[in-house]
Structure formats: C-alpha cells, structure tokens
Image (cartoon, helix red, strand yellow):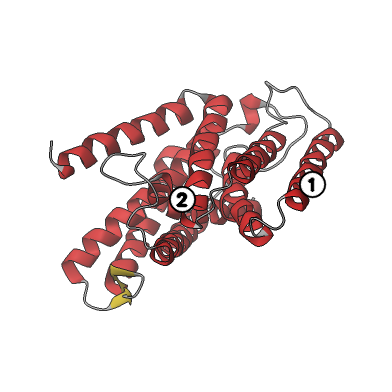
Amino acid sequence: MNNFTLRIISGSAMIAVIFLLILFGTTTGIYLLANIIGIFSLLEYFKLKNVNNKAVILTNIGLFIGIIFTLVAHFPYFSFTNIQLVVGIFMGYLVFFGVIQWIYRKQVSVLTQLFAQLYISLPLSCFLLIPTQGFKFPFNPESDFNPNLALMLFILVWSSDSWAYAAGKLFGKTKLAPSISPGKTWEGFLGGAVLTAVTSWAFNLYVLNSTSPFTDINAVILGLFIATFGTLGDLFESSLKRKAGLKDSGNIIPGHGGMLDRFDAFLFASVVMFLTIWLFK
C-alpha cells in the first residue's frame, strides 16, 4: 500500500470517528474526543521538547484530564450544578500540580510544563465549551447543547487547509514562511481565508440555521479568523518540529504523522471560535 492510499484511508477513518463522536456521542463523545487529542498531543509535545521523565509527563497528563473534567462538570452525566464545587476541584488540581513542580523542579523546566497546559489544555477546554456556548449552571442538554458548532469548527479547519492548498497550487508564488514551512504561500493563505469565510457563511445558513449564535457577517468573520489563526497554529507546530529536528511529531495516524501534526491548526482555532461565540453571543 503506497503512502497516498494510506493517507486517504487513515484520513477518512479519522474524519468518520470525529463525526461519530460529535454527532452521536453527544457530550460524552466530545469529552472523549478532547481527551484523545489532548493525551496524545501532550505525549508528542514532551517528545518535541526532549522530556523523558515519565513522572513529569504523566503528571501533566493527569493535570490535563483534571482541567477537562472540571470544565465538563456541568454536563448532565456528572450532575454537578454548583460552580463553587467545580472551582474547588480545579484549585485542588492546581495545588497538586504545584507540589509535583516542586519535587521535579531541577529535572524539567516549569515553563515547559506550564506551556504544555497553555498550548494544549486551554484550547481543548475552549473546544469543550463551544457546543455548550460557554458555562451554564445548571446545564440543560436539550436546549444548551449544539454539537453542530463543534462540527463547524472541524469543517472550517479542514476547509481552510484544503482551500489554502488548492489556491497555493494554482496561484502560489510568494512564500509565507520559507524557513518554517516552505510549501505555504501568501496566495494560498489569502485564497484559503476567503473560501473558508464562504464555507463558514454557508454552514451557518444551511446547517446551523435558527440554532446559530452567529449572524451572516459574524460567520464570515469567524471563517477569516479560523483560517488566520489555524495557519498560525500550523506554523507554530512546524517551528517546534524544526527546533527538535523532527519531520513529524509522531506516527499515531498512518500517513499523516502525529496527533499534533493533524490538530495543530485545530488547537489555535478552538480558542478563536470560543471567543467569537462569547463575544457575539
């Protein structure tokens, strides 16, 4: 099986799993999806940073799971409706993290570990709050949960990548960041941004429709933001790989590389979409 065929098969399987978890898994599916992306992304991040201390890596994964848990505590299957309880759990995890930092302070940079949480945990926290459109206590799954918003995020990230690739192939001449990602061009980026804005407008109009938190103009702005910050996320992960001297962050997805390779743009885009919903709500 050649690499192209492998990419098509594994890519299709990945998309199918994401669709199934979002559309049929409801809140549980999105929670599982965030954990799968987060845990493997953290493992790859520490690999890029050349961190081999298993205790530190597992502690950071534990902190990530704790942060994710507290953020979905208002989902109905946890039955937590008291925000003070959620804040208390979160503070407990921060204390635990601080103790571990003190124990291993001479072995792994604290900044490296803190950045892991900012780079991976924060965006995935935003992702969890996108279909719920923010915090709400108590949470009503029938009126407050909209999985199509999570689906919209993925579709816009994928469309941005695809449109930019197509536009770059057709019109690309001026390199966007030659020292980091030689294949990207300004023409590809601009073409991808415009067409992603159109895709966002169409999804908002025909899929979200009356359930959308966006106006048509808001949807266009969202598309432009996601194309812009998704590209920045891609370039940032590429810079991490270059500094580490690696071509891919991992090999968990055959033909595609690692989890960070596939979800680098998604991490930045998650923050942008959550903030856009929060600002326009």
What residue would you read off at disc 1? Answer: 99
Which of the marked residues, 2 or 1, is nearer the chain's N terminus?
1
In front here: 151 or 72? Answer: 72
Provide the residue designation for mark 2. 266
Please state which amino acid type lies under the numbered disc 1: Val
Q: Position of residue 190 (x, y in %)?
A: 33, 69
Q: How busy is the neighbourhood of tag 2: few (under 14 within 10 Å), some, or many (20 plus)? A: many
Q: Is residue 221 above or below residue 73?
A: below
Residue 125 as seen in the image, left or right of residue 148: right
Mark 1, Cα crowd under 10 Å, few <14 / some 14-19 / many 20+, is few
Q: Find residue 180 and report its horizontal and vertical position in percent.
A: 36, 70
Look at the picture and state if 255 lies above or below 13: below
192 above or below 204? below
Which residue is nearer to you in this view: 199 or 131? 131
Provide the secondary structure element on which disc 1 rests. helix
Identity of the residue drawn at 47% across and 51% down: 47
User: Which amino acid type corresponds to the residue marked 2 in the rendered image?
Assistant: Phe
Residue at x-position 45% and y-position 43%: 152
Left or right: 46 as drawn, with respect to 95: left
Residue found 55% across the figure and 56% down from its top: 272
Residue reaching furthest to the bottom: 174
Where on the picture, by quarter, is residue 15? top left
